[in-house]
Image (cartoon, rainbow, N blue to C red):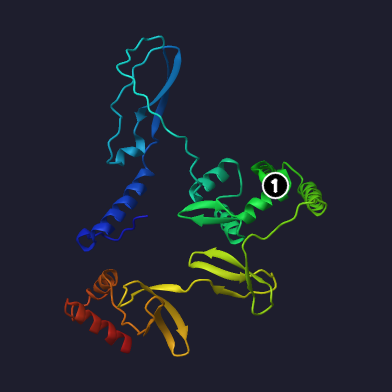
Amino acid sequence: MPTEQPVFLNRLDNEEVKIYDLIVKRFLTLFYPKYKYETISTMLDINGETFVAQETNVLDLGFKALDNRKTDSDKKIQLQKGKKLTVQSVIMEQKFTEAPSRFTEADILGKMEKFGLGTPATRAEIIERLLSSEVLERQNGKLHSTPKGKQLINLVNDDLTTPDLTAKWEKELEDIAKGKANAKQFMEQIKDQTKRFVREIKHSDKSYKMQNLTGSKCPECGSFLKEKNTKNGKILVCSSLECSFSKRKDPKLSNKRCPQCHKKMEIHNGVAGTYFQCRNCNVVEKATDRKKTINKREERKLVQKYSKDESFGNSLGDLLKAAMKKDED
């Protein structure tokens, strides 16, 4: 939230001004009334075919009054039941149906809140646990089920594949917290259900097959390696739970370009230190330590920190000298 620190807009760049403006407006909306509107649904009968039209009639802008975008707040919809309208023109378009869009993390969080799954503090953790256990994976900001996740859906009891059971448990836990239910009875019920689920899996003729196994073997324990997607690219990890061996499948690319083909060079760590390599041209260059540069944000912080001291100049060089002198003292 905005603080009591005075703001000097001339010291902010264009992007920082936009961010500051967004934060201040969002903060001010907390003190505005609710946004009120009504949705009017109209059913039209045209030559025996039924068409549905929906329009929104804004009753009170409320906190949306701070939004600079244009709204239809001045538009008043006047429709009456049985009123006849004239069809000016008819345009027919032929389109193909599309599959529903993949869920994002925000979509999943909304669904979890709707069905009462988890709490606001644990919902994001649940999604991360699903990602770490490799039943879900991120692809371009969307969540996709993995072959492992699809198999598990077919292997477990149907009660475990719907949100109804978890929502029921959450409701019973809430009743226990309010003193309306018995905690001991609830735990006995959980134990009985867990035993039943495990017993069904043990006696089932279905089996789990690991989909992401590779032909390579772990150099430490001899088990097969499996491929895993991470934020930093694909890695190979040991399929044995008792072994923690892992390595990158593909070399890490750097921002350094090859002087011949201008493609990104691979970065490696050798005996002599870090080096860059282009496999196409077989060009190898040793990595050199770059001097740390100061950005505009750090420069402004230095200016604000030492500008109160009138014994120093106003240039950045004078301020850096002041900082070095204070560190020596």
Which quarter of the picture shows residue 128?
bottom right
Secondary structure beneath dot 1 equals helix
Asked if 167 appears above or below 203 in the picture, the reply is above
The residue that label 1 is drawn on is: 160
Q: Nearer the viewer, residue 269 or 316?
A: 269
| Relative depth, front residue between 151 and 5 | 151
Locate residue 132, reporting x and y percent: 59, 61
Residue drawn at 64 percent across, 56 percent down: 148
Q: Is residue 305 above or below residue 231?
A: below
Instruction: Please state if 77 lies on the left or on the right of 246 as rendered.
Output: left
Q: Quadrant of the C terminus?
A: bottom left
Which residue is painted at 36% across and 9% down in the image? 84
Position of residue 20 measured from the top left corner of the image (x, y, whole percent) = 30, 55
Return the x and y of residue 297 as percentages of the image width and height: 28, 69
Question: Residue 316 sits in which quadrant?
Answer: bottom left
Residue 174: where, in percent of width, then height? 66, 45
Name the quadrant containing residue 47.
top left
| Residue 208 seen in the current view | yes
> Quick check: can you spot residue 41?
no
Judge the density around disc 1: few (<14), some (14-19), many (≥20) Cα neighbours within 10 Å: few
Q: Residue at x 31, y 80 (%)?
A: 292
Left or right of 213? Residue 207 is right
